[in-house]
Amino acid sequence: MFVRRCISRNLRGLFQSRDKFRSVCFASSPRGNEVPFHLSDPANVEGYVQELLEFTEEAEIMCEQNPRVCDGPLLLPKTDFDNMFDSLEKLKKQVQEQPGEATEAKVLQEVYSLAETTGEIFQAALFNWHHWTFYPLYDFLRPSERRYVELFCKHWGSDHHQYYFTDWKQKYRFSTYSYSHRIKGTTTNSSRFFVGVTNPQPQVAEAALTVMKERNIDAAQLMANPTLSFHSIGWDLEAGHFKLYLHVDDLSQLPEEFKSYIPDKTNPQLTMKNKIYDEMWKDLQHRDDALRNYGLLSFTWKSNNSSTVPSLHEKKLYTYVEDSVASSLVGVPEGVDYICLMTTNGDRGVVPQWDVSHLSQDPWDSVEWLPKISPLGKWIYDKYYSVGTHLDTIAWDSNANYTLYFPWE
C-alpha cells in the first residue's frame, strides 16, 4: 500500500534508465523514504515536471490501447495529448535552460495548473482502463460513489502537488489509490480498489460521508476523532465489502481499542497465520522500536441481504516496519523493499504485505516475485506493464493464493 514513483518512461512506455533522472527525481530517495521537498530548488521542479510527463504518457497509452478509455465511463477533461506534451516539454526545457526562473511565481503557477489537469486525466484514464480491462467497476457503483470517484480524480492532481511541495507531512505516506487482484487458483477478484487523498481535501471527505450515509454507515464520530484523518474509501464489489481508511499520524495516539492491533513486542498475543514467516515474526517481536510511528486504520462493512444496515465485518491496522529493522530481519523474502504488516481483528491475525523491489529496466528481472506467481498473475502483470507501470505490493500465501496491488506510484 505504500508507494512512490521515480522512474522515467518515454512516450510509448519503454523503460529508460532510472539513473538518467536520478539527480532530479525527488532527490532520488528510495521509494517512500523521503520528506516533501521544496520549490526553492529548480532540480525539484524539473523532477516534478518529469513526473507529470510520465502520468500523461501512461494516460495516452491507455487510451491508445483501448479507445473506449477516453470515452468513459468517467469523463476525461477535454484532452489533446499533443498539446499536453508540448506544454510539459516546453516547461521542462525552460526549467533546464533557465533554472533561475524555475522558482518564480509564474512558473510555479503553471506547474500547479498542469498538475491539476494531468492528475485528473491520469486518474480518470486509469479507472476507465481498469473498468474495460479487468472489471466493470463503474457499473456496480451507486450514484454517490460515482460522484466521489469523480471528485477524487478532480482533486488528486492538487493533492499530489501539495504533498510533494509542502511540509504538510514530513514523513512517509500510504498510497492514495490502488487496484488489487486477489488470485485463488485459476480465479481472480479484480473488483477491489480504493481512492483517496493525502492532504486535507474537505470536498472529498464530505463526499465520502455522503456515500456512507446512503449506505447506512455511521462513521461521523470516527472521522471527527482528532487523532485520525480521512484517507480514502474502497470497495470489494464481488464480496459486497465497503471500506473506510483513516490515517493515524502517531501510533501512541491510537484510540485505546486499537492499541492491541500494534504488531510489536507490546502485544505478544498476536500471531502470524502463515507459518512460512514464523522466523521473521519471532525476530520482529523481540525488537525495540520496530515500527514506524504512523499507521492506517481500516474498517470493512459487508452488505447484508436481510437488512438495509451493513454489518461491520473487519477492522484492520496497517503499519510499516522501520527500514533499519527490516533490513536485518531473518526470513524476509528476496525482492522486498519495505514491509507492511496488516493486523486484523479476525482469524487472519497479522498478514505481511511486501513492497516489491524495482532495480532494473527489465520488468522480469526487476521483481524477484515474478517467477513465483501463476500464469494468471503474470497475465495481469503484463497488462499493467503494457501501459507503463509496475507491480507495487504483493500479499503472498502460496502460488495458488496471493494478492497483487497496482500500480507502482
Image (cartoon, grey):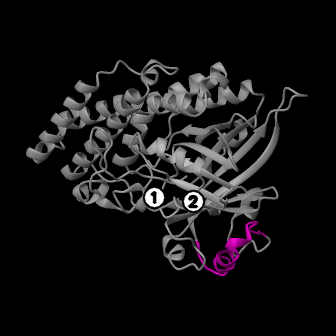
Q: Which residue lies furthest to the left in this view?
A: 97
Left/right of residue 321 with respect to residue 224 in the rendered view: left
User: Amino acid under label 2?
Assistant: Tyr
Residue beneath disc 2: 294
Residue visible at 37% across and 53% down in the picture: 36
Q: Give the vertical position of 219 relative to 276 (above or below).
A: above
User: Amino acid under label 1?
Assistant: Lys
Magenta highlight on residue 287 = yes
Which span is picked out in magenta?
270-290
Q: Give the vertical position of 146 relative to 239 (above or below).
A: above
The secondary structure type at the circle numbered 2 is: strand
- Return the residue nearer the eye: 128 or 36: 128
Within 10 Å of disc 1 (Cα), the crowding (few <14, some 14-19, many 20+) is some
Residue beneath disc 1: 171
Tell me where residue 26 sits by quadrant.
bottom left
Within 10 Å of disc 2 (Cα), the crowding (few <14, some 14-19, many 20+) is many
- Can you give x and y, in whole percent of width and height, for residue 393 in the image? 54, 55
- Can you give x and y, in whole percent of width and height, for residue 356 in the image? 50, 60
Question: Is the Cβ of the residue at disc 2 closer than 8 Å to that at disc 1?
Answer: yes
Residue visible at 19% across and 44% down in the picture: 103
- Can you give x and y, in whole percent of width and height, for residue 188 in the image? 66, 43
- Return the residue nearer the eye: 133 or 77: 133
Ranked by sequence position, the earlier of labels 2 and 1 is 1
